[in-house]
Image: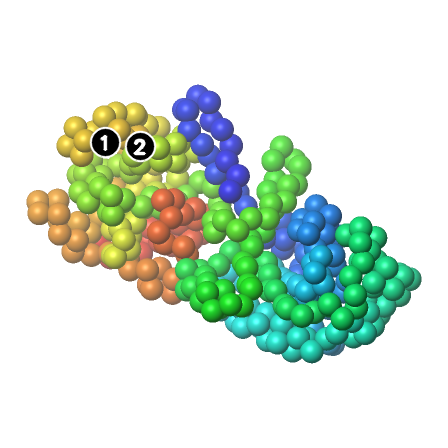
């Protein structure tokens, strides 16, 4: 995750992360082309890429080997945010190509890179030593790269990893800073569509009554070492309060009023931003939550999933506007 340091407010402003279509107007094949050139050098230097998907062939996007000769299957998705099929597709490829031995791998290498030397020689050039050809593809490993994922999809990959299948998820993002494009690859599950609208988690697990204090104060707040999340970038943006187990329970527009205080009611150091046009589904007399936008409903109306437990989840302008209108209809 990339943040811009705001020294005036002593806070951080998340920088917009984009997929390759939004950033460069290009598609999955272009992403494959970019990654093919750097995997084994800048990214995953422990691997050597020896093949890529060929047209009209049922193959993984990229094939690589590690220093033991094990097959590494890369599955790339430009979007693929929350589609569990990306995991099963990668598993299917790993199973399908588990029969490959050195001759099949070398044939594929020659077809993808016809001007190259033998695979065994390229392997030695990359790693600095040779292995016996019988050592190739004794085991398989799967790497799935997409723009983001869901908690449910993450549980699927974690399950297979737990039972002994080597599988990892990585997430790519493009950033534009001062007119320059930047690329990030991380196993951190965060997705920024737009840096100026967001929801803030009410921290139910650690500060049970924080949500009621926020609603009563018509504010969004963060506490302790998470205080830097609140920043001036939220001014005039939609800010929602997300309460675990219920969903969005309140909404408003950020203002220029941002303060660092010690909240004596909660006994916590706090940074908060006051919200205008504030609406909520909470009864401020007894703290009962009468109305909310639950997670499944949020996924349905925005047609995508989220990693809901995050302290902050950023939203596009259109998604935030849609959510606020839903809140007005729900909380009236």
| Left or right: 167 in relation to 238 | right
| Left or right: 31 in relation to 246 | right
Q: Residue at x 39, y 32 (%)?
A: 228
Q: How is the image coloured?
A: rainbow
Closer to the camera in the image, 302 or 72: 72
Q: Secondary structure at mark 1?
A: strand
C-beta proximity under 8 Å, tags 1 and 2: yes
| Left or right: 203 in relation to 100 | left
Residues at marks 1 and 2, CA–CA distance in whole angstroms = 7 Å
* Residue on which the image places disc 2: 224
- Which residue is situated farthest in the top direction here? 8
Where residue 264 sits in the image (x, y, percent)?
Answer: 16, 28
Where residue 127 sits in the image (x, y, percent)?
Answer: 77, 52
**Above or below — where is 215 with respect to 325?**
above
Closer to the camera in the image, 49 or 134: 134
Q: Residue at x 17, y 53 (%)?
A: 289
Where residue 237 sits in the image (x, y, percent)?
Answer: 39, 39
Label ID, residue 62: none
* Residue on which the image places disc 1: 268
Does any portion of residue 61 appear in the rendered image?
A: no
């Amino acid at each position: 995750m990339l943040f811009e340091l705001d020294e005036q407010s002593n806070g951080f402003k998340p920088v917009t992360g984009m997929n390759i279509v939004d950033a460069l107007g290009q598609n999955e094949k272009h992403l494959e082309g970019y990654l093919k050139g750097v995997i084994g050098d800048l990214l995953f230097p422990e691997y050597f890429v020896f093949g890529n998907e060929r047209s009209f062939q049922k193959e993984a996007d990229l094939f690589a080997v590690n220093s033991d000769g094990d097959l590494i299957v890369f599955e790339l998705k430009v979007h693929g945010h929350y589609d569990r099929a990306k995991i099963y597709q990668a598993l299917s490829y790993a199973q399908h190509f588990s029969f490959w031995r050195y001759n099949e791998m070398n044939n594929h290498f020659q077809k993808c890179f016809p001007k190259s030397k033998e695979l065994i020689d390229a392997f030695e050039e990359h790693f600095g030593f040779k292995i016996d050809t019988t050592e190739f593809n004794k085991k398989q490993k799967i790497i799935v790269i997409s723009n983001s994922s869901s908690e449910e999809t993450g549980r699927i990959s974690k399950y297979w990893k737990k039972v002994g299948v080597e599988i990892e998820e990585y997430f790519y993002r493009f950033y534009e800073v001062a007119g320059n494009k930047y690329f990030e690859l991380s196993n951190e599950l965060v997705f920024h569509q737009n840096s100026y609208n967001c929801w803030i988690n009410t921290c139910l697990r650690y500060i049970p009554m924080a949500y009621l204090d926020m609603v009563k104060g018509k504010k969004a707040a963060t506490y302790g070492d998470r205080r830097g999340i609140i920043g001036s970038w939220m001014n005039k943006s939609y800010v929602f309060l997300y309460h675990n187990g219920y969903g969005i329970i309140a909404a408003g527009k950020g203002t220029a009023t941002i303060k660092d205080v010690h909240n004596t009611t909660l006994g916590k150091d706090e940074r908060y931003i006051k919200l205008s046009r504030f609406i909520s589904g909470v009864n401020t007399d007894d703290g009962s939550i009468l109305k909310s936008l639950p997670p499944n409903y949020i996924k349905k109306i925005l047609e995508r999933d989220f990693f809901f437990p995050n302290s902050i989840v950023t939203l596009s302008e259109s998604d935030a506007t849609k959510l606020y209108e839903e809140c007005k209809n729900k909380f009236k």
